[in-house]
Image (tube, rainbow, N blue to C red):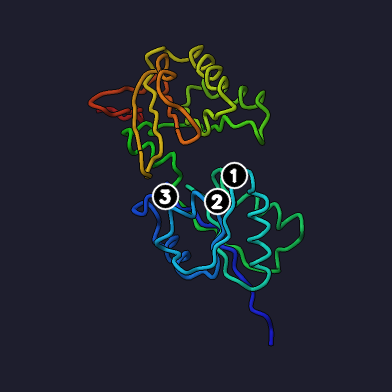
Amino acid sequence: MRKKKGILFLVGIGSGDHRDMTAHCIAVLRNCDLVVGYKRYIELIKPFIAEKEVISSGMLQEVERCSQAIEEAKSGKNVALISSGDPGVYGMAGLVLEIINKKKLWNRFKVEIIHGIPVIHAAAARLGAPLMNDYAVISLSDLLTPWETIVKRVAHAAQADFVICLYNPKSKKRTTQIKEVQSILLQYRKADTPVGLTRNVGRRGESITITTLDKMLRYKIDMLTIIIVGNSTTIYTNSQMITPRGYRI
């Protein structure tokens, strides 16, 4: 009897707020054989994976998680490998596909990418409508990208007048980079440019702050913070950040 091919589902769980998880995501979690993911994210989806087999691990073990999920799918299981937000936005999708390609595993099992709501979109919704015109998303983590490259991207995005969304802005070890980024932005943006600081969006302890570029460092910023820096047209009014699209009204 021919062995059944497994399926590796690369699942985006959004911010972790169950209201923001897609119906497709929830259906996959409920019907898969095994769930693999970062410990913090596994906790967020517990109601949907009761009594399922789970493989969880900590930070900086992304390659190991992806490799484990691949091996389980090769054995014929239907596996859900979870990412916060969307698996193709700083998630596991790219890494999984790279491993599969390197090891020539394309025909060993099926792969399905289940998109999720990127956390930046949940953050933007809390702030108003800051992403109504072109924007750039930049991670300030230099674990996988050289800091010199990140600085160049920030400077070019600022010069081009993009709304700028910053992921991973500050950690316990990386404390000076956000100051350098603020300094770069102040070369191209006015000091009173609106800035949204969103922390733990969709999770317990959510906080939303709207401030200005010159004052943003007065507030708590860490790895759970998403920052949205307005462009030259972004305004703050009635507790809302608004970046005009350009309509005549």
Residue 177 sits in quarter: top right
Nearer-the-camera pick, 221 or 136: 221
Mark 1 vs 2, N-terminal side: 2
| Mark 2 element type | strand
Viewer-nearest of labels 3 and 2?
2
Q: What is the x, y in percent for residue 183?
A: 52, 14
Q: Disc 1 marks which amino acid?
A: Met
Q: Return the residue at label 2.
A: 38
- The amino acid beneath tag 2 is Tyr
Residue positioned 66% across, 60% down in the render: 68
Q: Pick the residue in front: 145 or 162.
A: 145
Q: Nearer the viewer, residue 59 or 127?
A: 59
State if disc 2 and disc 1 touch (CB < 8 Å). Answer: yes
As rendered, which of 53 and 184 lies closer to the eye? 53
Look at the numbered discs 3 and 1 and tell me whether their residues touch, using CB distance below 8 Å: no
Q: Residue furthest bottom?
A: 1
Q: Which residue: 40% across, 15% down?
A: 215
Please state which amino acid type lies under the numbered disc 3: Gly
Label 1 to label 2: alpha-carbon separation: 7 Å
- Above or below for 97 versus 208: below
Q: Which mark is residue 59?
A: 1
- Left or right side of 88 for 118: left
- Specify which label sits upstream in the sequence, 3 or 1: 3
Vertical relation: 144 (above or below) 217: below
In this picture, is 198 found above or below 108? above
Q: Residue under circle 3?
A: 16
